[in-house]
Image (tube, coloured by chain):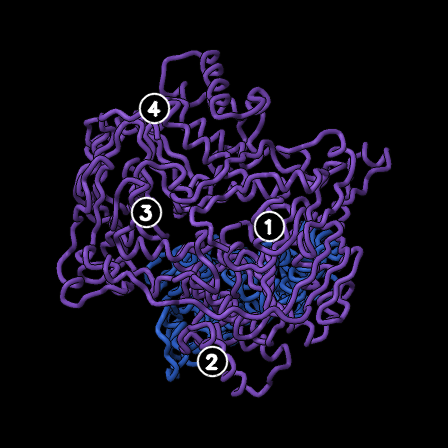
Chain colours: A blue, B purple
Amino acid sequence: MSEATLNTATEAKNPVSGLRRIIMMIGLMRESPAGMVGAFLVSFWVLVAIFAPLISPFEPNATLVPFMKPGAVNPDGGTFWLGTDHIGRDILSRIIWGSRTVLFYAPLATFCAYVLGIVMGLVAGYYRGWIDDVLSRIGDMILSFPVLVLYIIIISTVGASGLNIVIAIVFASGPGIMRIVRGLVLDLRNRDYVAAAQTRGESAWRIMLVEILPNARGPLIVDACLRMGYVIINIGVLGFLGLGLPPPDPDWGGMINETRQMALIFPHMTVIPCIAISTLILGFNLLADGMRDISLRD
Amino acid sequence: MAEQSNEVVLNIQNLDISYYTRAGEIPAVVDFSLEVKRGETIGLVGESGCGKSTVAMAIMQYMGHNGAVKSGTIEFKGRDLTKLSEEELRQIRGKEISMIYQEPFSALNPSMRIDQQLMEVPLAHEQIDVKEAHERARQILTDVNIPDPDRVLASYPHQLSGGQQQRVVIAMGLLSNPDLLLLDEPTTALDVTVEAGIVKLIANISKKFGTSQIYISHNLGLILETCDRVFVMYSGEVVEEGRIKPLFKSPRHPYTHGLFGCIALPTADKTAAPLTPIRGQLPLPHERPKGCNFAPRCDHFAAGVCDQDDIHMEDVADDVDGKHRVRCLRWTEIEQIRAEADQSKEAAGIGHEVLKVIDMQKYYSMHDRSLKAVMSGTSVKLVKANEKIDFEAHESETLAIVGESGCGKSTLAKVLLGLETATGGEIFLNGEAIHDVSVQSRSNSQLASMQMVFQNPSDTLNPSHTVGQQIGRAITKFGVEHNRHKVRDMVMSLLDIVKLPRDFYYRRPRQLSGGQKQRIGIARAFAGQPSMIIADEPVSALDVSVAAAITELLMDLQRERKMTLLFISHDLSIVRYLSDRILVMYLGQVMEQGLTREVFQPPYHPYTEALLSAVPIADPEVSKREIVLEGNLPSVLNPPKGCPFETRCPRKVGKICEEDRPPVQSDSENHHIACHIPLDELRQVEPVIEVPDAAVA
């Protein structure tokens, strides 16, 4: 009468370990060409950031020969493969070191925004009622500001620093994430397994974090990838507006800002950091597309 | 049933259908032959995955991008549908062949009025003007017994009830006067009393319109009520075909036998003649065994015979009753082997009182924020989800709560579990008052002693956690055990109890079948040694053979552990089979309660009478009085003032039913009926179900 044979002695191992799952993910990614390109672009920049000290040909802040075209040779040895800027810093080295900045602050800011958005979304969606009304209206208020205006107000009030950029981004994207999480929770909270947890007498936080949140992960991972792209744009924009990281440390947005007046005469100074930003954003967007493709397939 | 001519409308010969997926070619239907004469109704019956819907899709030539007819012909009125162009098919679909689907609310366009949707059919297929089309639409609604067709024509789908929607969908299918109507589980989404009306309508269609029908269902009882001939399918093949009565009386194929053993016929009994589930599982299409597909699950399997070549249909009889064919090599021998061992099980003695509910009420308040309601001071409305519920349950007893959707049975379960607290009245569990103790403030032992088994297998387990984690959590939460190794051992023994292999510990829900998930749900509910289990339609979403296994599992567990089972269901045949006492609810109130045999015999409450009549019974020997309820379930927001059943009651006395709450009359110590009709008069009513050898409990 049982649906499978009784098998009392089997002590099977966990069939899918963490590492195996990552490998499986990559294997699945192969079925989405867009996702593959995205994964390649992102991992390229991640590797560049990790190995920055090894692969960067010059000190990123060292003043060498100004206004060199790409491929020009440094009289003291070495080649400026991507040229130098108006005060003689090697652009390739600055791009390489700049990737560290962006790949540190963008994930950090996205992560913090997610922590805030998930907590707010879980609470609003699970409890409903007045707490949902209050949180949702606060979120609506923040979302009704143009993001850029919001950034400028925040940064110009508290001053430009890495930490403040993170705070500004968390403040501006938290409500958007809250909305997504809230929507997912509204659906998931009616599942029978949530009712089963309630009849077990589980605490509300355990139900939210252990029973509901893991089942919302699919759409959230895709959104996190997309959002990472927007955050990179925003960090770039802040840098461009002079509200980014304080000089002289390399920052892609700041590089565009510093050289934009010379863009017509020395286009490489502006175009190269632009390309860096675009490829990284493109990478994250394609990666998100790919993950969506995979999750839609069964 | 209807007048039949010998004209063959549909002739399918040796049809093979395959789906082409990444995993390769998957044969969905193999060697399928079928002849439908004009006016004839054919039943296709089988469990999910047997290919019955694929056949319907093939007839419509609508198989999606990855399905294709591999070989064979589908001749419809002399033309082979597999060879027609898309344009020619478009002319046939909806005009000459119509299809009716399971869920009426997704078959109708929510943004179009009913008249527009109905008129589309003749306007698309015939050269007629709008006025005539409207007249046709109105006529067809009258034909499918819709009261007040003009109001329905001017309505949007959401303004109609489920039963009316399905009538509209059927009307739409009949509108172009098709030669063939395909019905794919047309009543599965409906309540039983509504279903009974639709089934009656379907059974009359061929008589009225001369339409041939193919009726797809997993429910043998419905097939018996509607069809002339039946095809039993298993794993992509027809295993048995024949005229309905001879086949139901003496099924030949072991699978057909198995199906009948799985359903709670009036002759089944939980101790004397328990259900006999088919062991094993349906093989996946690409893992079908060599030879007979049913061989691994068959009690009559003979090595060297059944596992050799493909098996073809053999004639059992070809006489006045028509053909009876079976796909089994050993059908002649099986008949002799059939004398079975005694399978009876020991009855459990009913013990002390576990649960006592006294005058329990649960009201919800609804806020009407319209200006009119606020001005008139009626902005808060009370929804009486449960009104004056009164019952008790004992150790080792199965108490069934029966009623259709909206009758308040789920609210009752919520209140018992503490997910909601009662508005009034008292509830005692093992002597402790729990009516005002919400789930957060219940002690671990209170939580553990009452647990729930849910309806929907796909929803009952958390897809993110392994089976072991989910059962283990219940064990630690109830404070039964905290040591990790001991918890693990306990989970393993719970898996043994629900008859699943131990390596399921590491599986995730998506790797399990529906029946397996339901078993895990039961194991989880048993983690804290409960004294009471609430099972909310635990088998209604499962296939018959799986449902039988789960039912028997619950019964075995009850016998072993003496727990009280509160079984919530709308299906009176399963309720009759497993329950000791029954509570019949309608619109939040108890209409009748009593021991099972008392409820199934007169005196009946008129609603119980209608419910009994509505349940399809797959036994041609059993005769049933037909009672079809008119009208719809009233809204709980605006219930009738007097008796809740007054609006649909075929035995309504008069004014008194509309004005006054019916008194509760006691027929015996346990049997109570809430009705204005005097008990003596109710005792005169003939039994609804007549079983020939009256010696059935």
Residue depicted at x 44% and y 58%:
B547
Q: Nearer the viewer, mark 3 or mark 4?
A: 3
In contact (CB < 8 Å): disc 1 and disc 3:
no
N-terminal of the pair, mark 4 or mark 1, is: 4
Spatial CA distance of label 2 from label 1 is 41 Å
Spatial CA distance of label 2 from label 3 is 43 Å
In the picture, the quarter occupied by the N terminus of chain B is top left
* Residue at mark 3: chain: B
Give the amino acid at mark 1.
Val
N-terminal of the pair, mark 2 or mark 3, is: 3
Residue under numbered circle 4 = B210
* Residue at mark 1: chain: B
Residue depicted at x 48% and y 59%:
B458
Residue B187 is tagged as: none
Give the amino acid at mark 3.
Lys
N-terminal of the pair, mark 1 or mark 3, is: 3
* Residue at mark 2: chain: B
State whether residue B596 is above or below residue A16. Answer: above
In contact (CB < 8 Å): disc 4 and disc 2:
no
Residue under numbered circle 3 = B249
Residue under numbered circle 2 = B492
SS for callout 3: helix
Tell me, yes or no, whether dots 2 and 1 are on the same chain: yes
Provide residue B592's location: percent of width, then percent of height: 66, 48
